[in-house]
Amino acid sequence: MRIIKTAIEGVYIIEPKIFKDARGYFYESWNQKAFEEAGLHYTWVQDNQSKSAYGTVRGIHFQKGQDAQAKLVRALQGRVLDVAVDLRKGSPTYGRHVAVELSEDNHRQLLIPRGFGHGFSVLSDSAVFAYKCDNGYAPKSEGSVYFNDEGLSIDWQIDKDKVMLSEKDTKAQSFADYSRNPDFIYDE
């Protein structure tokens, strides 16, 4: 397994070593020892899975305070554009994002630490998406930033007239509003 640094410290692309033969393929999707050898120490406590149609955008979501979550995410079926946004006020990369295509073909995963917002858009007819989380779901601690906020400049690779959002995501706060009262402060 390759653990690839991105342009934002703490966000990693995980690329498995795939063993293929006439029967199909095999790979390790998680290896505690490999992560620890790379200096990444996570204990996953919850797995989530979603299925979404083309054009769905989920996010940009986060949980704050003691309920903050790190995530290890991947597409089990289909293709998604996965996005991690640095929400740690004072960080050298505050407000910047990493966008990576995750698919059933490339088997890549994205590791998103606490202090980041997370979202994805579905690029295929449908996608099944899996999340490992290091903290449980806590509705009282949920937060979100509007997916298409101009201050974030994210290209979700979906035509605006094809985007499907949940009611909750249509009511997300702007990045400017988040910045006035941030939920995460950068700590070197």
Image (cartoon, helix red, strand yellow):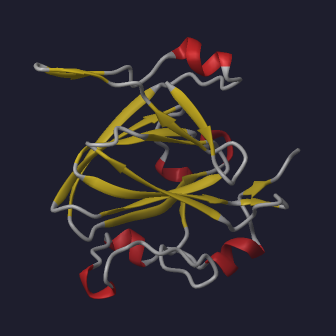
In the picture, measured across the screen, residue 104 lies left or right of residue 63, that is: left
Q: Quadrant of residue 22?
A: top left
138, above or below 160, in the image: above
Residue drawn at 66 percent across, 16 percent down: 37
**Closer-to-camera residue (16/178):** 16
Q: Quadrant of residue 53?
A: bottom left
Residue drawn at 33 percent across, 85 percent down: 160
Residue 4 in view:
yes
Residue 77: where, in percent of width, then height?
21, 45
Residue 36: where, in percent of width, then height?
65, 17
Q: Residue furthest left?
A: 23
In the picture, measured across the screen, residue 79 lies left or right of residue 66, that is: left
129, above or below 158, in the image: above
Residue 148: where, in percent of width, then height?
48, 79
Residue 34: where, in percent of width, then height?
57, 17
113, above or below 37, in the image: below
Q: Residue furthest front?
A: 22
Residue 142 in view:
no
**Closer-to-camera residue (16/140):** 16
8, above or below 106, in the image: below
